[in-house]
Image: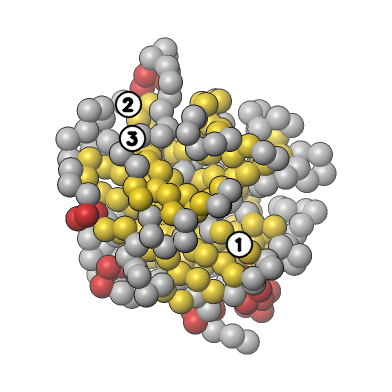
Amino acid sequence: MKDATRILRRHPANPLLHVKDYPGIAQLYNPAPVQHNDETLLLVSVVEHAAKRGYGRDVGQTRIARSKDGVHFTLGTGNFIDVQSEAHPWSLYHHFIDNRVTKIGDTYYIVTPVMVHGFVSPLGMLGRTRDFVTYERMDTITLPPNRGASLFSEKINGKYWKLDRPGGGSVRGDIWISSSPDLLHWGGYQPLLAANYRFWNTDKIGPTPPIKTDKGWLVIIHGVFTPAGGTYYYIGAMLLDLNEPWKIIGKTNSYLLGPEEEYEKHGNCDNTVFPCGAIADAAKDELRLYYGACDNYICLATGSLSEVVQACIGEI
């Protein structure tokens, strides 16, 4: 069995984006990747030193970084996601970060964890775009606390499906699954994967948008471990049944990526590698995993898609 920690290789150009290259930006992190036409796009979480809108430390926004080769990116200067309304409750929403993007048909659906002014816990706001120029807010699709909700890319058994991550903060975060007839009304909640199944996810675990493969739905996950020396974020994976996505048919016992390089160990949030999705190319047998490091950097690791899938099956 191949050691899962050896499948992914960090790109020699890492970090691809560095917070110090952008005056006025305090934090830069956790990209949601998507292949759109001939470009690789990253929905990047950004915190400015002098934000025009925000409460306390929660002043994050989403900007788009674009690249023709998937390595050299140009970060946009405008904020892409907003509530587009001053009506209640939208005027209370802020901190638009850590997006998850799923293409269904010809539309890209974006689940954005947002904070609500005066409340502690985050919830999931659904929006959509077709061109990554215009954005349309749709509705709130999770109750708090729910951070990291991720949509499947097609209907299964006549329903849309979503991975949820209730919990977090002082409460352990686990992964649940739910279904919907229309992407807006959700129910049928079922527990899927609990944190603490291995040392690297004792405190929290969370999903990203599932990737359809011939073996099952591949889900890149993060895990949080808090030993005496502080908090560490890792990246792993699980595999769900294609027709019964509430069934786990594999998961990595070892992590795929951990905070090992200097840019992954020190920054605004030390010892952090964090994914919001990945881009798969089955024809090339390639997985491109873009991830945030320490709330300072955007990085890339690549490896064999089939080996990641097999690591899930072989390590369960």
| Residue 182: x %, y % from top left | 70, 30
| Residue 21: x %, y % from top left | 22, 54
Inter-mark Cα distance, 2 to 1: 37 Å
Q: Which mark is on residue 218? A: none
x 33%, y 75%: residue: 260
x 49%, y 29%: residue: 134
Amino acid of disc 2: His
The reply to whether discs 2 and 1 touch (Cβ–Cβ < 8 Å) is: no
The single residue placed furthest to the right in the displayed view is: 157
Amino acid of disc 1: Ala
Q: Which numbered disc, 3 or 1, marks the residue that appears first in the sequence?
A: 3
Q: Which mark is on residue 280? A: 1
> In the visual, does 187 lie left or right of 258?
right
> In the visual, does 156 lie left or right of 283?
right
Instruction: Rate crowding at label 1 as few (under 14), some (14 to 19) or many (20 or more) other CA atoms within 10 Å.
Output: many
Rendered position, 227 above or below 31: below
Amino acid of disc 3: Gly
Of the two numbered discs 3 and 1 in the rendering, the one whose residue sits closer to the viewer: 3
The residue pinned by badge 2 equals 117
Q: Which numbered disc, 2 or 1, marks the residue that appears first in the sequence?
A: 2
The residue closer to the viewer here, 182 or 245, is 182
**Quarter of the image where one finds residue 83:** top left
| Residue 55: x %, y % from top left | 24, 30
The residue pinned by badge 3 equals 78
The residue closer to the viewer here, 237 or 214, is 214
> In the visual, does 89 lie left or right of 106?
left
Instruction: Rate crowding at label 3 as few (under 14), some (14 to 19) or many (20 or more) other CA atoms within 10 Å.
Output: few
